[in-house]
Image (cartoon, rainbow, N blue to C red):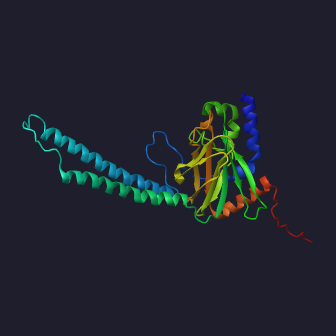
Amino acid sequence: MASILSGLTSGLTAAVAAPAAFAQDAATIIGIPHPGGTGFQHAATELASDLHWLDGFLLVIITVIVLFVTALMAFVVFRFNEKANPKPATFTHNSLVEVVWTVVPIVILVAIAIPSLQLLSKQVTIPEADLTIKATGNQWYWSYEYPDPNGEEDFAFDAMMVGYGYKDYDTAVANVGDEMQAAGVTRENYRLQTNTFVVVPVGKVVRMQVTASDVIHSWTVPAFGVKMDGIPGRLNEIWFQVDEPGIYYGQCSELCGKDHAYMPISVKAVSEAEYETWLAESKEMYAGVTRDVSVAALAD
């Protein structure tokens, strides 16, 4: 089995060598989880920034509520216990208190609902896209399609985890160390690095269409603030616009089977010029589109 996995990984790495090599050249890794981390990953899109703000806003509201309820309970315990208040009151209700405990929660819910619904609308309303990519979840890897607007130069490729099938980093290095080194896999990004990148231009609106070929998967990149389920027979959409060039990692976030933990997502955001270069190389490799080549005239 180890020999089969090694051969499979070697073949896949060789098949995508040119575009993959371009996509991994000395890029800064920005969106990646860290051991012991408790906060969000760096917000690389406007959507992610909005989500972080909403989380902080809700945290403030929740903290105020908890402190108020704790203080109220402490006051009741010390002020109205049997020793401090031997003769209990006989009233059964208080109209002012009842109005307050009805109105205040309504106001809090409205204050939460307004920014929440605005952000939800922003997430699901796809702006005019500069680029469309289709992601298809498979057991257990992702397939990507870059449709050409004219329908003439479409191309597609698969993205599999480098070192797929091995129980840990050291075992993977012992079996497919050369492929992992060529792909830039380290202990930090092991199980996050794929043999091909989803490459997108910085500052452009990307429409991501998500579906699946077998079971439900979920295309998720935390630094982008996006998460969309891929459902067989259905095409879902989400969008993002990356602000900073670099490498961002995600993972399938739907329990999709025994190798659920082995289908990561690797995205590289590059400048528009770099993206055009990668696009031309990828069309030539995956779609067989020959690029125009300028040949110098033969000297006399």
- Extreme-right residue of the structure: 300
From the viewer's side, name the closer residue of 119 and 163: 119
Residue 54 is left or right of residue 44, and the answer is: left
Q: Is residue 146 left or right of residue 238?
A: right
Q: Is residue 293 above or below residue 220?
A: below
Rendered-image quadrant of the C terminus: bottom right
Q: How many marks?
A: 0
Q: Is residue 97 above or below residue 300?
A: above
Q: Residue at x 69, y 44 (%)?
A: 213
Q: Is residue 220 visible?
A: yes
Report x, y in % for residue 276: 70, 62
Examine the image and state in which quarter residue 71 appears.
Answer: top left
The residue closer to the viewer here, 297 or 232, is: 232
- The percent coordinates of residue 34 (x first, y second) are 50, 42
Residue most toward the top? 1
Using residue 235 as the reference point, say whether residue 44 is left or right of it. left
Q: Residue at (67%, 53%) from the top-left corner?
A: 134
Up-down relation of residue 28 to residue 260 (above or below): below
User: Can residue 46 be seen at all in this image of the molecule?
Assistant: no
Extreme residue toward the bottom, this view:
300
In the picture, which quadrant includes the N terminus?
top right
Q: Position of residue 139 (x, y in %)?
A: 67, 39
Q: Relative to 297, does residue 190 appear above or below in the rendering? A: above
Q: Which residue appears farthest toward the left when viewing the image?
A: 87
Q: Is residue 116 left or right of residue 217?
A: left
Counting from the top left corner in percent of width and height, residue 242 is at: 56, 59
Pick the front one: 177 or 34: 34
